[in-house]
Image: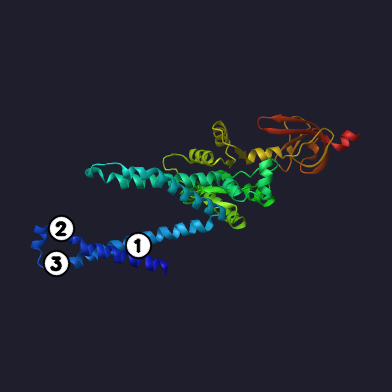
Amino acid sequence: MLDAIIIILLIIAAAGIGFDSIELLPQDMLAKVTNLDALRLVTAGFGALIGGAIGLTVQTAYRRLEAQVRQMPVEVILTRSIGLVIGLLIANLMLAPIFLLPVPIDFAFTKPLVAILGSVMFSYLGVTLADTHGRSFLRLINPNSVETMLVAEGTLKPAITKVLDTSCIIDGRLEQLLDTGFIEGQILVPQFVLQELQQLADASNDQKRVRGRRGLDILNRIKVAFTERIVIHPDTYDDVPTVDAKLIRFAQEINATLLTNDYNLSKVASLQKVSVLNINDLAQAIRPIYLPGDNIDLKILKEGKEPAQGIGYLDDGTMVVVEEGRGYVGGELRVVVTSALQTSAGRMIFARPQASVVA
């Protein structure tokens, strides 16, 4: 119903403008017109067509805006609204003296232009500051909450917002991390990351297409499972060429942590003072540590380079070199760790069969 009202009102308004627009024609041209009423109807018809097109555009934009607002958390809507109102008030207070200045009549049109420009600038500034400091503002509104008192005394630190990278979504491990509860705070997916996933899903290359569709499927699942925490952010940064540069700039502006598994992106972000959580670093850090004397149940998969060596792998991919293990290739046995070696390619563990150690 609302869509029809928007379109009908714009059609009527445009038709009315077209109907009265012939009054703007010079008098000598009007004198040559034999039927002014027919000309009015023609211009009104053209105006109605243009109004219908504008109405469809406005209706589509309104529905998109409504969908984005529905997905926003209540606190984001509240803080952005307050930031918008404060920005408009400041703009009016600062721009009011401009209308009192004596300006030549030929340049009087500059006053409303400056007022519109100032209102837009201060409104955008107010919304941006609300996104950055919204939680702190809400604490000022309710200073007696337990969370506010703990934050004030330094006992409790507010959860930092996380920004998702494309590779982190496609990787898939994020879904398990969210299920376990190890990642806290609001999680933002910028619009340009969503666009990159869509481009990958539409690519002609089969491998890219599979990766893009996998990323979209994972994002849809976590969006359904964590509706209040996953937010699609509309910022696009058209002046920034690459997605990685956009991610770094976005994280800097909102003081967020970048969540990725891209080694190069994490290094560049760190150089620009952006906090980074690398899922690969997390996976490396939580690998079990085996000390000399620990027992491991291991399947020997192949022969080693040296005589009598057997090679097996742990669940996390760590290579285990078993001395005197060549005779057990294809079978399972319990081995005893003798030493461990950290290399640039990863970690290696050296072990012997438990039976030979006991003997």
Percent of width and height locating residue 44: 23, 65
Q: Is mark 2 on a helix, strand or loop?
A: loop
Q: Can the viewer see residue 170 in this picture?
A: no
Q: What element carries label 3?
A: helix
Give the number of the disc on residue 36.
Answer: 3
Label 2 or label 3, whichever comes before in sequence order: 2
**Does 264 appear above or below 164?**
above
Mark 3 and mark 2 in contact (Cβ < 8 Å)?
no
Kind of residue at disc 3: Leu
From the image, tell me which residue sits under label 1. 55
- The residue lying at 46 percent from left, 44 percent from top is 125
Q: As rendered, which of 167 and 87 lies closer to the eye?
A: 87
Position of 37 compared to 101: left or right? left
Q: As rendered, which of 270 and 242 lies closer to the eye?
A: 270
Percent of width and height locating residue 224: 59, 58
Crowd rating for badge 1 (residues with CA inside 10 Å; few <14, some 14–19, many 20+):
many
Mark 2 and mark 1 in contact (Cβ < 8 Å)?
no
Q: How is the image coloured?
A: rainbow
Label 1 or label 2, whichever comes before in sequence order: 2
Position of 175 compared to 42: left or right? right
Q: Residues under labels 1 and 2: Cα distance? A: 27 Å
**Does 305 appear above or below 297?**
above
Q: As rendered, which of 190 and 77 lies closer to the eye?
A: 77
Residue lying furthest right: 359
Percent of width and height locating residue 194: 50, 49
- The residue lying at 60 percent from left, 52 percent from top is 229
Q: Residues under labels 1 and 3: Cα distance? A: 28 Å
- The residue lying at 49 percent from left, 38 percent from top is 245
From the image, tell me which residue sits under label 2. 25
Quadrant in which the N terminus is drawn:
bottom left
